[in-house]
Every structure is written in structure tokens, then in C-alpha cells.
Amino acid sequence: MAVRRILQLGDPVLRSVSLPVSAADAGPVLRDLEDTLAEFRRTHGFGRAISAIQIGAAVRVIFMQVEDVRYELINPEFTWRSSETFQLWDDCFSFPNLMVRLERHSRVRLMYERRDGSRAEIDAVGALSELIQHEMDHLDGVLAVDRALDGESLCTRDEWLRQSSPV
């Protein structure tokens, strides 16, 4: 369909709580999300997922491309989150030059609708769990910067890469 502009940190629409959408109406948004993700990956060299609110569509839709697996999540809902957590540096298309140190659940379970209206479930661990939690936060108007561990848990991407690189 179309590559859409990704809303940036400071745009009040990013703080909107997204509303449920019918599976039949989610198709155009999913196509735009897929095109927008592909373009972001082409221009920035990273990226695995995007939520509809990031392109200004306040509906509960997420598109993820993790390696060769595509996920189209319509009206996703957590059904379980582990009590075990882990810390990581997170990034976001809405502030691509900023890294945020935060904490996520190690494992989550998610129910969602497919395009055909059928229900499905994902049991995610580690990086996939973190990615799902990041995108689910977007649907509720929560940004990674809101989850920063403390005042020292923000870093530019360039500095993070410099510190992460072996000497």
C-alpha cells in the first residue's frame, strides 16, 4: 500500500490508547505497517516490528518481521506474563537515535486475531517476548522512555554502539 511517516517522540498521538479493530478492517493498516517497516529497515539498517499508532492509526494492530517469520497481530491481549524479568537496552522507531535501559518480563503469552478473524496464541521468550511487550506498550500509549530504569538509563545510539564495541 504505502510507506507512512513514523511519528516521533513528542508527537501527542503516540500517547493515544489504541482501539480494537475488526479483522476485516485491519488489512490496509497491516499493509502500510509492512511497507513502512521495510523502508525503515532499508534506511536505518535495523527494525523488527511496528505498531499502528506509530503511523498515526489508533487501532490495536502490530506487524512484526522476525528473521523469516511474519506476525500480523490484530487486537492482541496478554494472557500471562512471567514474574521473572531481565534488563536490556531498547530502541524505537519513534526515537531511533536513543537507547533506553529498561526491564521486561522474560516470557509472555499473547492472544490475538488473524486477518481471517480466527484466534491464535503466541508463547514468547527472551527477545521475542521483549519485542511484543514493546509493541504492546505502544498500543496503550506507553513509550520505552517511560520505562527507563533511572536517570542514567538513556544513551544515544552512537554512544551505545561505541561502548558496546570491542576495542
Image (spheres, rainbow, N blue to C red):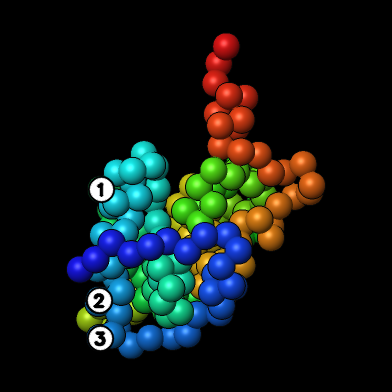
Nearer-the-camera pick, 59 or 6: 6
Secondary structure under the numbered disc 3 in the rendered image: helix
Q: Are marks 1 and 3 in contact (CB under 8 Å)?
A: no
Residue 101 in sight: yes
Cα distance between the residues tagged 2 and 1: 22 Å
**Does 88 sit left or right of 23 as displayed?**
right
**Does 119 sit left or right of 147 as displayed?**
left
Q: Residue at x 38, y 62 (%)?
A: 5
Nearer-the-camera pick, 167 or 111: 167
Name the residue beneath numbered marker 2: 28
Residue 81 in sight: no
Crowding near the residue tagged with mark 2, few <14, some 14–19, many ≥20 C-alpha atoms within 10 Å: few
Residue 24's disc is: 3
Q: Residue at x 56, y 37 (%)?
A: 157
Point out the image quarter for the C terminus: top right
Residue 135, above or below 60? above
Nearer-the-camera pick, 86 or 13: 13
The number of discs equals 3
